[in-house]
Image: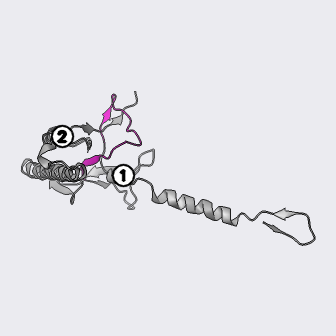
Amino acid sequence: MASSVGSNEMEVNLTPLLDLVLQLIMFFLACINFAADQASGNVQLPLSISATEIQPKTEQDYILVNIELVRKDRLKPDGEPVRTPDGKPVRDPVEPRTLKFRIPGGDDITFLDRPDQKSVGLGRAMNRMKELAKNLRFRISARDNVKVDSIKELKVPIIVRGDVEAEYTMIYQLIQQCKNAGFQRVELRAITKNN
């Protein structure tokens, strides 16, 4: 606190307080969970009446798998993107139709939407899920001091975000592979449809 000489008024110096508040804000921003970065904004989720809202904070980690149809912005003649009434850009599938699996543990798995290519892409995605399961078992084994072979079921949930235009049989096969790899909980995400 500072006071002027010959005066009874006191001035409050707020600079240290503001400095502290800004430092706290920067600290909390640095501690934010960046899990939302895993969700691809390019995946157009299907609509569902029975979809439930994703809880903002889970007690445990989860693995997010995105299955998206590769899209590009539709452009006006002047090069500006066409927008919907709510301001979102209109996106059309690229030609030839291309699908992309985004699974943690490596690069995106991209392939053409043709039967021969889909089986190869799905096989690579299934191998990635097996590798994830194997790595998780090793980490759990080291943490809990148990044998790797004794860990049959994995409690880390898998959240699958499948594009509305992706074939459900392919999504179903990936979900089945996750269960075969030992993941107990596999969830499929959708957007709640307003009646």
Query: Which of the two discs, 2 and 1, labels the residue nearer the N terminus?
Result: 1
Find numbered disc 1 in the image and state the secondary structure of the residue it sits on.
helix
Horizontal and vertical percent position of residue 72: 29, 55
- In the displayed structure, 17 sits above or below 98; it is below
Q: Amino acid at mark 1?
A: Ala
Query: Secondary structure of the magenta portion, mostly?
Result: loop
Q: Is residue 47 magenta?
A: yes
Pointer 2: what residue? 153
Residue closer to the observer: 6 or 53: 6
**Residue corresponding to mark 1:** 35
The answer to whether any part of residue 97 appears in the image is no
User: Viewer-proximal residue, 4 or 82?
Assistant: 4
Coloring basis for residues:
one colour
**Residue range of the region highlighted in magenta in the rendering:** 45-70
Looking at this rendering, what residue extends furthest in the right direction? 6
Q: Position of residue 19 (x, y in %)?
A: 63, 65
